[in-house]
Image (cartoon, coloured by chain):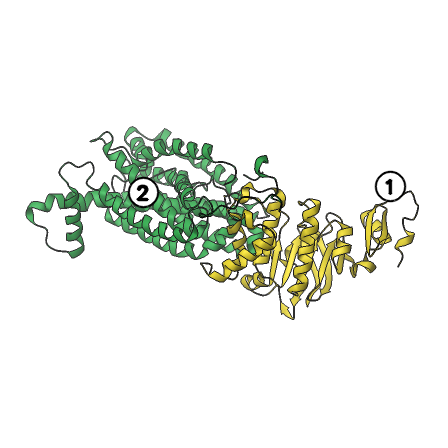
Amino acid sequence: MLSVRDVTFRHGRTTILHGVGFDLNRGDFCGLLGPNGSGKSTLAKILARVYRPECGAVTYDGADVLGMSRREAARLIAYVPQSSEVAFDLSVRDAVLLGRNPHIRVQPAARDWEVVESALDLLRLGDLADRSVASLSGGQAQRVLIARALAQEPRILMLDEPTSALDLRYQIETLQLIQEITASRQIISLIAIHELTHAHFFCNQVVLLDQGRVAAAGAPDAALSAERISDLYGIDVVVRPSGSRVEIFPALFDSGGDTHDNAGR
Amino acid sequence: MTTPSNEVAADATPSRPAPRPSGRPGRRPPRRFKALIVVVSYVLAAALLIWYVPIGTADVTFGDVVRVLRFTVTGAAVPEDFQSTFTIVQGLRLPRILVAAVAGASLSLAGVVMQAILRNPLVSPFTLGVSPAAAFGAALVILTTGGAGNAVLVTAAAFVTATVASVLVLGLAHSKSSGQITATVLLLGIALTQLFEAATSALQFIADEDTLSAIVRWTFGSVNDANWSDFSLIGVVLVASLLVILPNAKHLNAIAFAGEDAARSLGANVTAIRFGLIGVSVLLASVVVSLCGVIGFVGLVGPHIARMIIGADHRYLIPFSVVTGAILLATADTVGRTIISPIVVPVGIVIAVVGAPLFIYLILSRRTGR
């Protein structure tokens, strides 16, 4: 179980996170939602051990995530940043191999290469493996970052808006893939994401952040009400059941006048 | 290099799979050969250095060099008729070539580390202002001790000012550390370079003619006065630095290719590595500059050539940059010795004359991707 307790983070005089806390279990795929500047990326970086919170605790099955060595933490949690600039020429395969860093001493072993190849295959990067990362499209480069995180064989996968550079098809494929891996490997995945409909459909848990505080946490059905979303984003939204799923969209084109009513659950 | 060009940007779809290169994967040497290339390159470099020894001296043959090496290794008594050849080769030529080799290796090694940590292929060990600071320290001592000066004191002063300047840059950058540390380091380095160049110019302005020529001669990097103790000193620092740097190769990969944040999440202690390894680079560059003067371009071009041949994986790039730097500087010095013989052109001038066009070529021939 991943347990985040009372995490507070300041940048200069601005407090970015105020006592954030939530729990996730193995197999949970959690959407980290909230407007721009609500603290999603900061929370992601704290879990990835990029930032150190001012106070609070993060534990995984009782182990202190913030206190363990960087190598240990890197074996536990993989982080997919929003984007990555490449200053040097590097092949896709070597870029994915970076994910093995916490597992290797100096030289990668045969097993490391196997893991890299299977991560490449999972993200359908096999044909691009020898290409330079600099020659890839934005979407391909994003998938390389996800493959790198999977090669890390983490028990917690922290993705910071991994789908924002992807076209619709790859967004869905990526989310399906993460959902599938989360279930099959029984890991915990967290994804910072703006697409509320996608989050509702793919994630079994969501955490809504509002100016550094948890506004709601839990199952998407309960947490993502039209009222709460409208309130949080400052724009009227419609939450409309559509078959077994739910569509969430701005009320711009909705003249039916049922903006808030059908959300009440 | 960050924006993909259009013709390669299209995502490969399953219906239109990108052609898989058959047989040879990629344009770079396959991985299992990279280690072999590194080993072979060290053997070749050693052979090349021995081959350079007799060049430019009419009465020394390659056989003589081998003989000298045998006497040196076995410690056997040198015959009377061979004594003068032995002295030339053992006392002058060998240390000169070896110092050029280890100095080039050190600068190239420092360059590859700086480029990785600052994530910028255009920085060099002198980016932090090491060389103008060293030149200022040397000029100050030459001026105050008058003309010729005390060689050891000049060297020490150059080393101290170079180190102080770099520590200043790193310290200031760290105190203001908020994400943009790389840009801060680069800008502070530029500022300090300007400052020390102005200060050295001021010293030159008030110096008399003899002192002025001594200062100018010092700033031309050269290995003309190289001796065995220079070789040992640079060599020891080089080997010790390699022992510190090589185990961090995978972390350098993470920092260079994934960025500092991602490198942290991949298990690298970025802050410690950044300051530790920049410190090692500064030490390497300061030692070379204080003993040989300012030798530019090797720290920039050496890593570039190495990267073109063996690829960007630092596990191979680091040891290979050592070789390219060594060969580059030893070759430049051999050219400088022989091109308008008997006049010896300082290696710093040769490498700048050869290095600048070479670097321009490297930049212009650099394609996006691949």
Chain drawn green in the picture: B
What amino acid type is highlighted by mark number 2? Ile
Q: Nearer the viewer, residue B345 or A127?
A: A127
Q: Give left or right: position of A10 versus A75.
A: right
Image vertical order of residue B280 relative to residue B333, above or below? below
Q: Position of residue B338 (x, y in %)?
A: 23, 33
Q: Which mark is residue A253?
A: 1
* Residue denoted by label 2: B327
| Residue A264 at least partly seen | yes
- Going by the picture, which residue comes out furthest to the front? B15
Gap between marks 2 and 1, in whole Å? 70 Å
Image vertical order of residue A109 relative to residue B199, above or below? below
Label 1 element class: helix
Q: Nearer the viewer, residue B201 or A129?
A: A129
Residue at mark 2: chain: B
| Residue B164 at least partly seen | no
Chain drawn yellow in the picture: A
Q: Position of residue A220 (x, y in %)?
A: 79, 58
What amino acid type is highlighted by mark number 1? Phe
Q: Are marks 2 and 1 on the same chain?
A: no
Residue at 53% x, 49% y: name it. Answer: A129
Residue at 50% x, 62% y: name it. Answer: A111
Q: Position of residue B79 (x, y in %)?
A: 7, 50
Q: Nearer the viewer, residue B90 or A26?
A: A26
Q: Give left or right: position of A264 versus B34.
A: right
